[in-house]
Image (tube, rainbow, N blue to C red):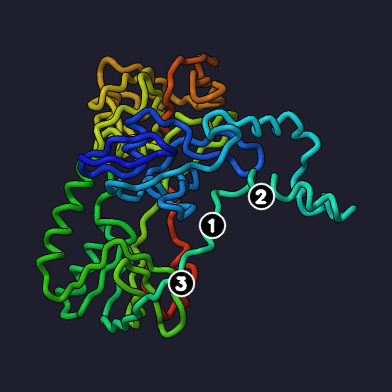
């Protein structure tokens, strides 16, 4: 066990904790505020794909709390609020939203010019994610050149399998993943499969693994710069396999940004990997069997399932004792500070279900930004 500091408050950390899981276990529910109207933002994806959990760590702003280890002695601060991030009087700006159309900030305060000097500090404080320390010395990063036959970006099941296939074909392989292999997956069959593949990969002498290493671009050559903890690796592979997987699809409805709304993988990871209940009662919306698999870790951590919203074809797969709503859709998440109820519309009509967590598993969207940079003759993509 260790301890980190959150705005003067001492928070206990446990083995395997991220900053996000340690803070959530300690009762923190507001991690940031929205850019324009200062709406509360809670934990959401837990895979580093959303901006909700950006905090300052030891003075460095915009650190993703959900994928940053909770090391002993860290000083953590959330986006400034007036007077606090939990109770931010600047959120009252939403009362004037009819006067703040999209793009107003590009046209306002230009004349008279002196007015900008009056309001600049307030606008920057409202819109920023924390002050940038100006006294830090420039970092000296070592650069290392790598020339593998095959570069695999992504350490999921597809990436690990591609690396093993390359090694079996006699190629030298470099596999990079922006996190630790498997750490963002909830407990279950897929996590077990990835852990098994990872063990085989690490035992293969032709494969080198770089974790906590981000491929930041794919350029002609091909050249793939990889920003790792030890150095900036300039990788010149003969072939590239992009196996960066997918992110869960977002739901769009009133209240979809409230604290207490989770993506399925994030909720299952908080509950399964960290053992922290995501709430007292939850509604799960699942469009596939993979979404239903999130039920087990969420229930095991102590959260009651108020209802499961699924296509009619999946209703029979909902465990006995849990209410299934067939062919329903969430039309609203209600609450002021966080989710307090979910409004569901189904063929049976519209109803309001009391809960403090809403879990969305609505399907997957390819995480293919890196692959889109590649010329077709310079990269081979795997899902």
Residue 165 position (above or below residue 10): below
Residue at mark 2:
124
Alpha carbons under labels 3 and 2: distance apart? 24 Å
How far apart are labels 3 and 1 at the CA level?
13 Å
Determine which of the numbered discs, if any, sits on residue 138 in the image. Answer: 3
The answer to whether marks 3 and 2 mark residues whose Cβ atoms lie closer than 8 Å is no
**Left/right of residue 235 with respect to residue 165 in the rendered view:** right
The numbered mark, 2 or 1, whose residue comes first in the sequence reads 2
Q: What residue sits 46% from the left and 43% below the top?
A: 77
Q: Which residue is mark 1?
A: 132
With respect to residue 285, does 15 lie above or below?
Answer: below
The image shows residue 278 at horizontal and vertical percentages of: 35, 28
Report the front residue among 285 and 13.
13
Local secondary structure at mark 1: loop
User: Is 152 rendered above or below residue 295?
Assistant: below
Please state which of residues 311 and 154 is positioned toward the viewer in this rendering: 154
**What secondary structure is found at the residue carrying circle 3?**
loop
Question: Where is residue 134 shown, x and y percent of the image?
Answer: 54, 62
The residue sitting at 25% across, 52% down in the picture is: 182
Tell me, yes or no, if residue 289 can be seen here. no
């Amino acid at each position: 066990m260790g301890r980190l500091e959150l705005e003067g408050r001492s928070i206990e950390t446990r083995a395997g904790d991220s900053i996000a899981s340690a803070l959530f276990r300690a009762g923190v529910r507001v991690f940031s505020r929205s850019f324009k109207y200062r709406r509360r933002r809670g934990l959401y994806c837990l895979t580093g794909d959303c901006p909700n959990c950006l905090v300052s760590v030891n003075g460095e702003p915009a650190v993703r709390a959900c994928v940053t280890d909770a090391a002993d002695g860290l000083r953590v601060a959330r986006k400034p609020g007036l007077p606090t991030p939990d109770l931010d009087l600047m959120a009252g700006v939403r009362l004037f939203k009819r006067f703040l159309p999209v793009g107003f900030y590009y046209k306002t305060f230009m004349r008279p010019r002196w007015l900008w000097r009056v309001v600049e500090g307030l606008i920057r404080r409202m819109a920023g994610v924390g002050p940038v320390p100006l006294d830090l010395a420039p970092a000296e990063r070592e650069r290392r050149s790598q020339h593998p036959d095959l570069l695999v970006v992504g350490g999921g099941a597809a990436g690990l399998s591609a690396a093993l296939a390359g090694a079996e074909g006699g190629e030298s392989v470099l596999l990079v993943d922006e996190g630790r292999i498997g750490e963002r997956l909830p407990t279950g069959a897929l996590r077990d499969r990835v852990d098994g593949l990872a063990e085989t990969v690490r035992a293969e002498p032709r494969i080198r693994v770089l974790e906590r290493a981000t491929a930041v671009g794919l350029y002609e050559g091909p050249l793939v710069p990889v920003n790792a903890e030890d150095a900036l690796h300039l990788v010149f592979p003969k072939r590239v396999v992009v196996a960066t997987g997918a992110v869960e699809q977002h739901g769009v409805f009133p209240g979809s940004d409230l604290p207490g709304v989770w993506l399925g993988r994030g909720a299952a990871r908080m509950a399964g990997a960290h053992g922290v209940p995501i709430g007292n009662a939850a509604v799960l919306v699942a469009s596939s069997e993979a979404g239903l698999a999130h039920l087990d870790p969420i229930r095991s951590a102590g959260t009651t399932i108020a209802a499961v919203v699924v296509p009619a074809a999946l209703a029979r797969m909902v465990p006995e004792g849990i209410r299934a709503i067939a062919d329903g859709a969430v039309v609203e998440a209600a609450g002021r500070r966080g989710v307090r109820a979910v409004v569901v519309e189904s063929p049976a009509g519209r109803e309001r279900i009391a809960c403090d967590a809403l879990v969305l598993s609505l399907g997957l969207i390819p995480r293919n930004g890196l692959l889109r940079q590649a010329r077709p003759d310079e990269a081979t993509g795997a899902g």
